[in-house]
Amino acid sequence: MIDSIEQKSASHGISLKSQNVRTFTFVLIVIQSIGIRFFSGQGTFLAIVIILLSWKGFSFLKKKDITTLALIIMFLCINSIVNPTFELSSLLFQISLVISTYIFLLQYQSVQLLEDDFYRCLKFIFYHASVGYVLYVLIAQIFSQVDFAGLSYYNLFYVFYVSAKDYGSLARNVGLCWEPGVLQLVLNLFLFLSIKRKKSIFFLCLIGLGILSTFSTAGYIIVVLNIVYFIILQIRNKASAPIIILVSLICLSGFFALIKGNASDKFDSSNTSGLVRLRDFYIGVELITEKPLLGHGIFDAKYLESKVSVSGIESGLFTRGYLNENGDFSGGYTDGLLGLACWYGLPAAIYIYILTFRNKFAGVWYERIILFLILALTCISEPITYTSIFLLFSFTCFIFKETKTLKKEPA
């Protein structure tokens, strides 16, 4: 059954086949950015596939777009020249992300169509993750363990996945994402857009249950922001029933209780997850202070190990037994929020933050604040600020104006 979004697109002369191709490409962008790493070189391979599927975007390439892309690539090249740790392979990969994301967005002559396809992509991932988790709860015994890129999952027919790291007696939902902390981002973005599109309370609650299944502290905090967003819309709608606001406030208090418990565990002195977050914050501040203008380039754990001041931060937080068992800087540097300034320098990071805040998925000021916080709070513990899914938001500022007329796609 074709939903209202598809009917709306059809009324503008957009073929369903073309829309499905774009939505599928959107799913590939999510998998490339935050998906399970099924094989080595997956990111580069998917960047090429995304460019091939987005070939129509080249027909909308204008002089200003070429200038914008040239400036971005020039900056990346300068950054790699002044930072030898920024290897050629990493540089080429970053350039491929920039080009593939930009060309993909150029296909859209309307922000509304972009949001429609993004919503359908998020809906698919939500349904997939929900079905997979329900199957795990019902028939966990037939799920088998599998490892990808050093992470363990329980899977069913290599189609449905949950994390092998449990929360109490329950596994954590990952869907198609590499870990629960990024699945919550997808689900919270889906919840944000569903609230914006005035979906039913029942459907919003289902999305909330999906976020609960990730057992992510960041996810719970962000749900609170989404509930606040929902309450704001209800207050602005004078016809809305007070009972809806009352129920929302009850849900809000429930998530506050979850946050309090999770945060207490997260920052317990014996909780390594919380200590990793604290370690990466201290490291980020140290690296930014050392090279604030052009940063350190994209670096790896070996680069951090070579810096005495940075190594001292980790040894001061973790026991020698933990470091001997897990190695130095296990999991790599995970603070994507400070990571932008560490990699590219403070001026570039601030500029990207501003572009992200001004992204075209949000309209009024409170939507901009909430959507920016959804991304920022996730990036504190996830190094995703150099991925296509993150670039997507900032790049909308280059391509779309506040009001963009719809043009018919080229044949």
Image: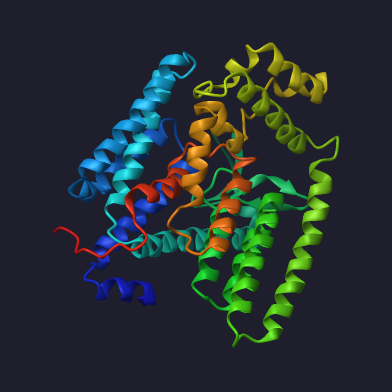
Identify the residue at horizontal 41%, vertical 15% (top origin). Answer: 81
**Depicted 284 relative to depicted 240: above or below:** above
In the picture, measured across the screen, residue 100 lies left or right of residue 191, that is: left
Q: Is residue 291 above or below residue 252?
A: above
Considering the image in quadrants, where does the C terminus appear? bottom left
Q: Position of residue 372 (x, y in %)?
A: 56, 52
Total numbered circles: 0
The one of 154 and 223 positioned closer to us in this rendering:
223
Looking at the picture, how far across and down is residue 6, in whole percent? 33, 72
Task: Note whether 99 is above or below 91 in the view shown.
Answer: below
Q: Is residue 305 left or right of residue 348?
A: right
Q: How is the image coloured?
A: rainbow
The residue drawn where x is 38% and y is 53% is 26
| Rendered image quadrant of residue 388 | top left
Query: Which residue is more in the foreground, 304 or 238?
Result: 238
Residue 91 visible in the shown view: yes
Percent from the top left, x then y, of residue 237?
58, 81
Q: Can residue 37 be seen here?
A: no
x 48%, y 16%: residue: 83
Q: Is the N terminus in the top left, top right, bottom left or bottom right quadrant?
A: bottom left
Q: Residue 172: image x %, image y %?
A: 67, 51
Hey, which residue is sitting farthest left in the picture? 411
Quadrant in the picture for residue 103: top left
